[in-house]
Structures are given as structure tokens and as C-alpha cells.
Amino acid sequence: MKTISNRRVKSEAEIIALEELKQMTPFFLIANGAVLLISGILGLFIKVDWGVFTGLLIGNIAAAVNFYLIGFTTGRAIRRRDTKRARSYFAFSYGMRMLGIFGVFAVLITFGLINPITAIAPLLYPSVYYKIRAVFNKSV
């Protein structure tokens, strides 16, 4: 990470992560629409409250920040000379991110501020996105 006149310059991994997030945005919107549609259908049978919407909002923010931090962590891990130290740094960062996300989610769920399903669903979007993209890339 370099600084130029007190401004931090993004690493190549961070730039790639931001570009990937831009490419995933339409999928995120479609997936959010699907989650809202399913929630609406379930709302006919069970009580659905505003926690569905706040869960989606918080979940999307957490997913985007997590994805960006993966890029940031990758950039820092790559700069480490020792492969073993890079792996342990990456694993530690992953563990801390997950601990932080689920800690915040646990507090918000405990106070009834978010729906747990709609909060966790966006964290799965990148994985689903890449699986779908791989299927379409194989057929081309």
C-alpha cells in the first residue's frame, strides 16, 4: 500500500474487487428482488415485518464490505514474502470478518431489528454469482 500526498493508493486486488462488485450489482438487484418476492409470498401465510427490508439492507452492506475486504486482505497477503504467513494472515482476516459480521447480526437479530434469513442471504450472493457465471462461460 503506497501513499501519495497522504492519500492511500488502492492495491491491484482492491481495484479488482471493486470492479467485480460493479459487475455483480445487477445480480445482487435480481437476487434481492427474488428474496423480496419470496418474502411477499410467505407473507401471505406468516407474519412478515419491516425486519425483512432492514435485513436485506444490512446484509447487502455486509456482503459488499466483506467482498471489498477480501480484495484488501488478498493484496496485503500477496505482499508477504512467506507463503505460510500469508495463508495464516488471510485465514485470520477471514475469521475476524466472519466473527464481526455474525456478531453484529446476532445483536441486531436479538433486538428484532433484522430478519436473519434476509440478512444472511446476501452473503451467499457472490458464491451463487460465480457458480452461475461458470455455467454460462462453459457453454460459450
Image (cartoon, helix red, strand yellow):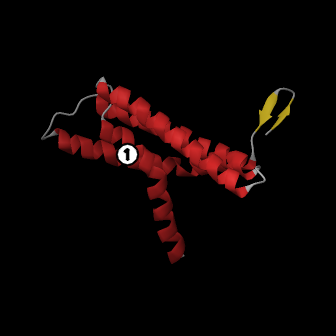
Residue topped by disc 1:
121
**The C terminus lies in quadrant:** bottom right
Kind of residue at disc 1: Ala
Q: From the viewer's perspective, is residue 80 above or below residue 54? A: below
Badge count? 1
Classify mark 1: residues with Cα within 10 Å, few (<14), some (14-19) or many (20+). some
**The N terminus lies in quadrant:** top right
Q: From the viewer's perspective, is residue 2 above or below residue 132? A: above
**Residue 20 or 87: which is nearer the viewer?**
87
Image quarter for residue 104? top left
Q: Is residue 4 left or right of residue 61?
A: right
User: Where is residue 122 drawn, in percent x and y?
Assistant: 42, 44
Q: Using the rendered image of the protein, determine whether residue 108 is visible from the camera's viewpoint.
A: yes
Q: Residue at x 58, y 44 (%)?
A: 92
Q: Which residue appears farthest toward the bottom when viewing the image? A: 139
Q: Using the rendered image of the protein, determine whether residue 19 is visible from the camera's viewpoint.
A: no
User: Where is residue 119 drawn, in percent x and y?
Assistant: 37, 38
User: Where is residue 51 drawn, in percent x and y?
Assistant: 30, 30
Q: Which residue appears farthest toward the top when viewing the image? A: 111
User: Where is residue 113 drawn, in percent x and y?
Assistant: 32, 25
Q: Residue at x 53, y 38 (%)?
A: 96
Q: Is residue 113 left or right of residue 47?
A: right
Q: Is residue 47 left or right of residue 83?
A: left
**Residue 26 or 120: which is nearer the viewer?**
120
Q: Which residue appears farthest toward the right when viewing the image? A: 5
Q: Residue at x 46, y 63 (%)?
A: 132
Which secondary structure, mark 1?
Answer: helix
Q: Residue at x 72, y 45 (%)?
A: 76
